[in-house]
Amino acid sequence: MSDDEDEKPKRATKPTEVKINDGMDVIQKRAKDVDAFLAKSNGKDALITAIADPPLGSKNDQARDLNYRTVLKAITAVKEADVAKVLDEIHTTHGGAGVDNLMKYICRGLSEADSCAVLLKWHGAIVEKEGLGPIVRVMTDRRGV
């Protein structure tokens, strides 16, 4: 018998836990990537990168705050005329979950009174394009950003 045949797969002793992506190194790298896109005046790719794999439900406030500031910076960099195209691209890239994550950041920004005029335009564009579903899902999801 070879060594490969002797090794049996190990069984999990407890259910697999959902991994929360709240490592500061990952979020800091994402912030740098977003800054690089913004330096090239590429708000669309900055926003798509910023909302990818957010630290949903993380207890690490620093990670959540840094990611929020990164997303807010990307949202405000997108030109108003490009909002519909960017939403289409987010939906294509991340699916409905990407739009829901974006709505979570918009709701957080509105609750903290950050760039409300811009965020309200995004909110309206999402509702116009996606309907009320993202709002309902954001309000019922306990995992905050």
Image (cartoon, rainbow, N blue to C red):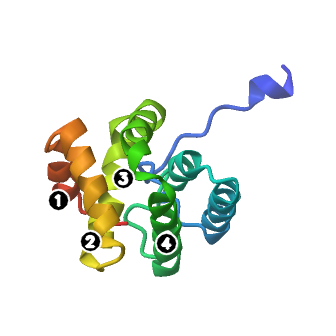
Label 3 neighbour load within 10 Å: few <14, some 14-19, many 20+: many
Residue at which label 2 appears: 110
The vertical placement of 74 against 126, above or below, is: below
Q: Residue furthest top?
A: 1
Residue at screen point 29% across, 71% down: 116
Of mark 2 and mark 3, the one earlier in the sequence is: 3
Callout 1: helix, strand or loop?
Answer: helix
Q: Give how far apart the Cα atoms at labels 4 and 1 are.
A: 21 Å
The residue wearing badge 4 is 69
Q: Residues within 10 Å of mark 1 (few under 14, many from 20)?
A: some
Query: Is 26 or 69 nearer to us in this picture?
Result: 69
Q: Type of residue at label 4?
A: Arg
Question: Which disc number belongs to residue 101?
Answer: 3
Q: Position of residue 7 (x, y in %)?
A: 73, 32
Instruction: Give the mark, 2 or 4, whose residue is nearer the N terminus.
Output: 4
User: How many badges with numbers are in the image?
Assistant: 4
